[in-house]
Image (cartoon, coloured by chain):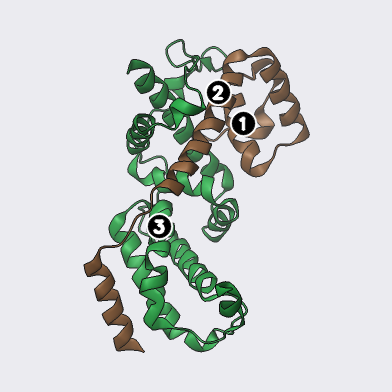
Amino acid sequence: MNTAIQNTNTTLNPQLWVQNYADYLYNIAYYRINKQEVAEDLVQDTFLAALNAKETYNGTASEKTWLTTILKNKIIDYYKKASTRNESPLQINSVEAPSYDYFFNTQKMGHWRSDTVPKDWAIDGETAETKEFYAVLETCLDKLPIKWRGVFTMSLLDEKETKHICKEMDLSSSNFWVIVHRAKLQVRECLEKTWLKL
Amino acid sequence: MEEIKAHTYKWYEFGCKDATYLITKEKFNGLSISEKGLLKFHLLTCKYCRKFVSQVNAIDKLILKNVDNINLTLSKEKKDALNQLITKKI
């Protein structure tokens, strides 16, 4: 009912934006960038940009979708700017993280090293959804190089957006997969080591 | 850059390092026919990489679930400030 009204309405209600969408947009921004202050700033920028572009809103998309699109463009801008300042989360050279050599024996065709080889997990669906397990997961994600975490989560959340960012940044996608891949290796190993020790 | 290039794969030196990379790549980009063949064969013969596949799939799902579970909210001060800003601009 509500959405039907929204969809046919071509006017915006900026007075209600904060109440209706601020938290929603904040979550989107936070999980893609993983920095609280940046996420807050982006929500603010989104509202300001939306006010400036009020006239271009024609009601083909709902207010929520329209604001989300603006925010996602802001997120791309953020990544672009970070890369021109040489602070790009997508450069791995500068980042401290275990290299492939840590996981694989590069002398021997790149087989798993004996201490990092995947072991059997005594984790079934139920254990995995306990608070304790999520706490461990959180710790392991925190151990990722800080710049990688947002990139990693984004790659899981939104495939299209991820591709878009690679394209916009003129970034070879393989560069991107290397980061996502190394994040995966690291998180998996950390979970295994931490969880099995508990 | 520690990039692994597709055309450098040779079946006799294709190991777990390459296989796990292709497992990640497959999800987003898909694989070429030869990459698919190499990976398929590797997974048939390597129980560790099979374990890796099921574990990372589980982790991906859990992370997404965790994102759904946690709803962050902006502080009241921040919201008030945003409201003021918007009211000024309307």
Check disc 2 and give the amino acid type.
Phe
Chain identifier of the residue bearing label 2 in the image: B
Q: Secondary structure at mark 3?
A: helix
**What amino acid is labelled 1 in the image?**
Ile
Asked whether the viewer can see residue A45, the reply is no
At 38% from the left and 26% from the top, the residue drawn is A190
Q: Which chain did the image draw in green?
A: A
Q: Nearer the viewer, mark 2 or mark 1?
A: 2
Please report the residue visible at 25 percent of the width from the left and 74 percent of the height from the top: B80
Mark 2 to mark 1: distance in Å? 9 Å
**Residue A45 screen position, x and y as percent:** 37, 72
| Mark 1, other Cα within 10 Å: few <14 / some 14–19 / many ≥20 | some
**Residue B21 percent location from the top left of the image:** 58, 30
Q: Where is A138 relative to A37, above or below?
A: above
* Disc number placed over residue B23 in the picture, else none: 1
- Find residue A136 and report its horizontal and vertical position in percent: 35, 30
Looking at the image, residue A44 lies above or below residue B3: below
Comparing A165 with A86, the one in front is A165
Image colour for chain B is: brown
**Mark toward the viewer: 2 or 3:** 3
Q: Quadrant of the N terminus of chain A?
A: bottom right
According to the picture, the residue beneath numbered tag 2 turns out to be B52
- Report, in whole angstroms, how far the alpha carbon at label 1 lies from the one at label 3: 29 Å
Label disc, if present, on residue A27 of the rendered structure: 3
The C terminus of chain A sits in image quarter: top left
Residue A146, image quadrant:
top left
Could you tell me which secondary element the residue under label 1 belongs to? helix
> Can you give x and y, in whole percent of width and height, for residue B59 in the image?
49, 33
